[in-house]
Image (cartoon, rainbow, N blue to C red):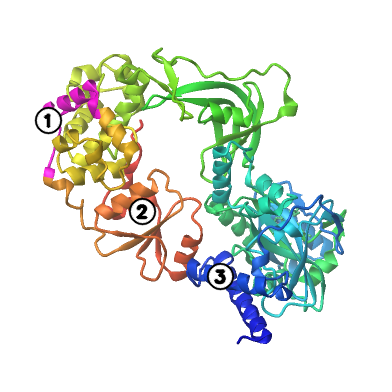
Amino acid sequence: MVNTLSVSERVAQLRESLARHNHAYYVLDAPTIPDAEYDRLFAELQSLEQAHPELLSADSPTQRVGGAPIPELVPVRHAVPMLSIRTETDTTEQGVFNFDTRVRNALGLVADDGPIEYLGELKFDGLAISLRYERGLLVRAATRGDGETGEDVTHNVRTIRQIPLKLGGHPPGLIEIRGEIYMRRDRFEALNQAQRERGEKIFVNPRNAAAGAVRQLDPRISARRPLSFFAYGIGDYAGFDLPETQAGLLDAMGAFGVPVCEHRVVAEGPQGLVAFHAHIAGLRNTLPYDIDGVVYKVNRVSLQRTLGFVSREPRWAVAHKYPAQEELTELIDIEIQVGRTGALTPVARLRPVFVGGVTVTNATLHNEDEIRRKGLLIGDQVIVRRAGDVIPEVVAPVVERRTGAERSFVMPAACPVCGSHAVRAEDEAVTRCTGGLFCPAQRKQALLHFASRRAMDIEGLGDRLVEQLVDGAIVKTPADLYRLGILALANLERMGERSAANLLAAIEKSRHTTLARFIFALGIRNVGETTARDLARHFGNLDALMTADEGALQEVRDVGPVVARSIVEFLSEAHNREVIEQLRAAGVQWDESESLAPASDRLAGLTLVLTGTLPSLSREEAKAMIESHGGKVSGSVSKKTDYVVAGSDAGSKLAKAEALGVKVVDEAGLLVLLGESPETAQNNTE
Ligand code: IVH
């Protein structure tokens, strides 16, 4: 028989172990046990607590799930005010020296006095929060508010897994940990995608999404918004041995199990901060979360005390910002672009605006539903965002700026390029031109795709050339490319005899290809590079593929009813079959045994891990390429990993690789490993 004491012991043991695994998973990003094992321990704790309600306590991991909604947010007075920091207006490196000069002058130092020690941190773009821990237990979480009085958001903050309900190590009697709640960019994208699918409101940026989640009245909603946290300071405390430096304070908070950002530097004098500023500027796009700058702080707490405050801002800290990732501009017009499969895509024409380090003049609006969901009108002032390496996006109109002259966008009923009917299938968001290859826009895109590097790889056949070839009715189908003569080409604009000859040579060279590339080059809807390769492997030759029905096609790995239907539809079109015949007649050929063999064994015995977004290859494509060269792709980094291929927004896997000393390459580096020089790896545009 189990007595109460041993039940309470077991409960304590389970709570301690779940908190430890939680910390490893959410803070260290290094899971210690399989999810199923965690779930089992969790379920055991839950059932013990249910059977012994007297043992329930607020710091139990079972108490994170959102409780009942509250009627309103209650004001909280901060025992120690939450101040803000001054922003250095000079965004160049001079800004660092301005700060150093101000600090030195305030301390009455002269040149001979030696450098001041600073700490460089990131300036997280989220919302400030104060977490009050008494005897190690989280008792209250409050927003900054006006700095004196914030709002009690404990009910929501308890749902954030990165925030410990109970501090680890040897927590003091009282400590208020201050920091920033933020949302990672990938989580933000996923949240918006889910909102879109449910037809709900789209969030403007991760900061707004995070702030909205924290201020929810219903913690169950908040619990579904994936939030993170970094600590950067403290408020009230008692029984705490205050470290002598800001760096020491961060370490102490880390030791309590609170997330502290790894990107920080201790610098002797301003020079090290200049380097930090530049280093982080280079890193900014690859960080998984938004920052709007860096923060410099005088490291010694005693010096911070001496420096004190001016007009409620500390003299010992400053924010040094990077160029904004969001700007305001005018939505001049919405134009329609026609894609390879006939999709009519609305594109925003914008008054040029410098944002996120580039000048943006247009941005895709995806489809008409998206325009409606965002409530955009032509002529609106809009917020344009470009964070990380992601493509620029029109996020929202500024409704207050409307003059009444704005007008709504209407999807055209006909293709603006060829005049064919435009139709929107009931279950689709996209409107399509029905013109097929009759439509010059579709023809151009189809040719560009056919010639692209991973399809037939015809070097030099780019946008402008295709434009001229199609507009001049010189080329109608891909097969026409193989009939081109030097005369027809040399007469084109900006085309000398020499480049004409080079192009012909490239076309000639492309006659010898592989079945997989050929299938991919056809541009069948829903057939990407990986599917094309699977089809080539499965059927071995083109005739077998051309006679396969939907059932036979679905026997191919990863081919479902939608893909099978696309293939059958494409191959049952007489003009598509004709183009295929003409291509074969023009001498396009491949070695049939080749489709079964790996492309090379360059990567034989090597294990690679992919992380982040690569600039041109999709995850699938990169995986297929690695495998076709005999390599293995694994989902997690270990000492046995040979290479980590990192793109933008690479997160914990990259950090782990660096920690383990595993070699890290980017996409260009991967192509070198595969024996493709990055020069030829660029897209086929002029
Ligand atoms: S220190 C007394 N450090 O920026 C100094 N703030 O205006 C208090 N922030 O409201 C702030 N990253 O929300 C500090 N590493 C960092 C920060 C940071 C972001 C935010 C914070 C504050 C605002 C400053």
Q: Earlier in the sequence, mark 2 or mark 1?
A: 1
Which residue is outermost to the top? 419
- The residue range painted magenta reads 571-592
Task: Out of 440 and 496, give the one closest to the viewer.
Answer: 440
Residue 253, numbered circle: none
Q: Is residue 493 above or below residue 67?
A: above
Rendering quadrant holding ligand 1: bottom right
Measure how far apart labels 2 and 1 are at the Cα level.
Answer: 34 Å
Q: What residue type is disc 3 on?
A: Ala
Task: Out of 445 and 284, give the one closest to the viewer.
Answer: 445
Taking the image as shown, residue 330 lies to the left or right of residue 574, namely right
Q: Which residue is mark 1?
A: 587
Secondary structure under the numbered disc 1 in the rendered image? loop
Q: Is residue 15 above or below residue 280?
A: below
Quadrant of the snapshot with the C terminus: top left
Percent from the top left, x then y, of residue 428? Answer: 46, 30
Q: Which residue is mark 2?
A: 669
Percent from the top left, x then y, of residue 445? Answer: 35, 26
Q: Is residue 397 visible?
A: yes
Measure how far apart labels 3 and 2 are at the Cα level.
Answer: 32 Å
Q: Earlier in the sequence, mark 3 or mark 2?
A: 3
Q: What residue type is disc 1 on?
A: Gly
Residue occupying the point 29% across, 27% down: 447
Residue 60 figure quarter: bottom right
Secondary structure under the numbered disc 3 in the rendered image? helix
Looking at the image, do the residues carrying marks 1 and 3 touch, with CB atoms under 8 Å apart? Answer: no
Percent from the top left, x then y, of residue 306? Answer: 85, 68
